Amino acid sequence: MSLTAKDKETVKAFWAKVAPKAEDIGQDALSRMLAVYPQTKTYFSHWKDMSAGSAPVKKHGATVMGGVADAVTKIDDLTSGLLSLSELHAFTLRVDPANFKILAHNILVVFAIKFPSDFTPEVHVSVDKFLAALARALSEKYR
Amino acid sequence: MVKWSDFERAAIQDIFSKINYDVVGCAALSRCLIVYPWTQRYFGGFGNLYNAAAITSNPKVAAHGKVIMAGLEKAVKNMDDIKTTYKDLSVLHSEKLQVDPDNFNLLADCLTIVVAGQMGAAFTPEVHGAFQKFLAVVVASLRKQYH
């Protein structure tokens, strides 16, 4: 299920539209993940406040979307491009990779809410594939 | 026995009173067939599913979208015992239709995305959570009679 040339074009074009709202998207997606999949809260026990509008959620949402933005620029070789991020997640953060899929789903839900006419089924499949490829690249150094 | 909070009950009833069944059923099923193309294996008799445009305009997809929504409505009306309500549906999906139950999650994700798109900002994280809990119970009930 690798990214076709068309997938890459679709992702880049869609990203250009959504990038100005990246921080909001990140905050919303992360809030949803914590609310809808409470098991994910276990990774953030060091935060004083995990609620939807809180400062740590806002900041971290922006960090995550910064990573996604970076991945878009490295879409032709995600594995090498995201090597150090993969090491971070594998050795330091040790996030179970199953959670990448969960966050990806919540990002898609936020796209559907904020960009209802742009997030067509064709865009949805390419973006879903991209986020899955991103997750695979992030999992690279785990074992 | 699933426990629903007052908020969750109200949220589910509210969602289903607001969404357009004809639009949501067709859109969710179309998205599922487009985003997860292997799900097309169950719809051999539907004719043209060759590309996204064909799928979204296929009348059999639209008709089946309505069937799905009618099924969901049964669960909405029987939230306290979806398991029993869905017993025959579960047998149907396992023995006659022989659908891999992992597909239920794929359709559930597409339903969430379509409903989110329809409701916009009203689909808050709390409402989103209630909806996904509802779909999780629906999926678990549909899986119940698989042996």
Image (cartoon, rainbow, N blue to C red):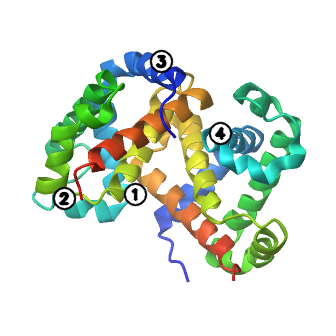
**C-alpha distance separating marks 4 and 1:** 22 Å
* Neighbour tally class for label 2: few under 14, some 14-19, many 20 plus, Cα within 10 Å: few
**C-alpha distance separating marks 3 and 4:** 20 Å
Mark in front: 3 vs 1 = 3
Instruction: Judge left or right: residue B102 versus residue B147.
Output: left
What chain does mark 4 sit on?
A: B
Q: Quadrant of residue B142?
A: bottom right
**C-alpha distance separating marks 2 and 3:** 32 Å
Q: Position of residue B17 (x, y in %)?
A: 67, 49
**Which sits earlier in the primary sequence, circle 3 or circle 1?**
3
**C-alpha distance separating marks 1 and 2:** 21 Å
Question: Badge 3 is on which residue?
Answer: A9
Say if mark 1 contacts mark 2, CB within 8 Å. Answer: no
Question: Badge 1 is on which residue?
Answer: A36
**Which sits earlier in the primary sequence, circle 2 or circle 3?**
3
Foreground: A65 or A79? A79
Please state, as top left, top right, bottom left or bottom right, where the N terminus of chain B lies in the image.
bottom right
Question: Badge 4 is on which residue?
Answer: B31
Say if mark 3 contacts mark 1, CB within 8 Å. Answer: no
**C-alpha distance separating marks 4 and 2:** 33 Å
Are callouts 3 and 1 both on one chain? yes
B65 lies above or below A126: below
**Which sits earlier in the primary sequence, circle 1 or circle 2?**
1
